[in-house]
Image (cartoon, rainbow, N blue to C red):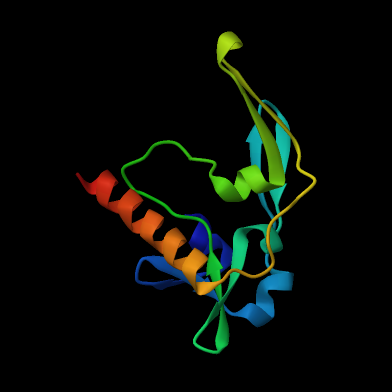
Amino acid sequence: QINRAIGAQNAGELYIVDCSVVASMPNVSFVINNRFFVLRPQDYILRVAASGGVACVSTFVGSDSLTFYILGDVFMRKYYTVFDMGNNRIGFADSVSGAPTMLSMSTTFLIVLLQIVYLFCNKQ
């Protein structure tokens, strides 16, 4: 499991890390068609402002029932994605925008809600 490999701790439906160690966390690489797509800790760890403090949350969500990965919004913020349905292919290129550095509590709530819905749907 990716969250275990990066040192994230289970906090219910989310995995959190100590914000002071984010800079020293490992990169996570996906190999697609012999090309490496690298997510740095600042790409896959969200710094969330909540209750007057900051929490660092992993964006990796897993399911034991899936035999594949879903490359979601974190991956697509880092890599511009083109879906060529006519030729049944997907293309990736480096994005120029990158990931936000801090999310508000309302954005975090939406992410948590989506994660809970995702987990619920996979248990059905």
Q: Position of residue 15 (x, y in %)?
A: 46, 68
Quadrant where the C terminus is found in the figure: top left
Kindly give the residue lying farthest to the bottom in the view shown. Answer: 52
Q: Residue at x 44, y 36 (%)?
A: 68
Taking 59 as reference, is 90 left or right?
A: right
Name the residue located 33 percent from the left edge and 58 percent from the top edge: 116
Q: Residue furthest front?
A: 106
Q: Position of residue 3 (x, y in %)?
A: 50, 61
Q: Quadrant of residue 122?
A: top left
Residue 2 % position (x, y) = 52, 56
Tell me if residue 116 comes above or below residue 56 in the rendering: above
Instruction: Give the tally of numbered discs.
Output: 0
Q: Position of residue 118 (x, y in %)?
A: 34, 49
Left or right: residue 83 compared with residue 26: left
Residue 84: quadrant of the picture:
top right
Q: Residue furthest left?
A: 124
From what the image shows, is residue 1 above or below residue 124? below
Between 71 and 117, the one nearer to me in the picture: 117
Please identify the quarter of the rendering in which residue 31 is found.
top right
Image: 119 above or below 89: below
Q: Which residue sits at x=27%, y=46%?
A: 121
Residue at (55% x, 61% y) in the render: 5
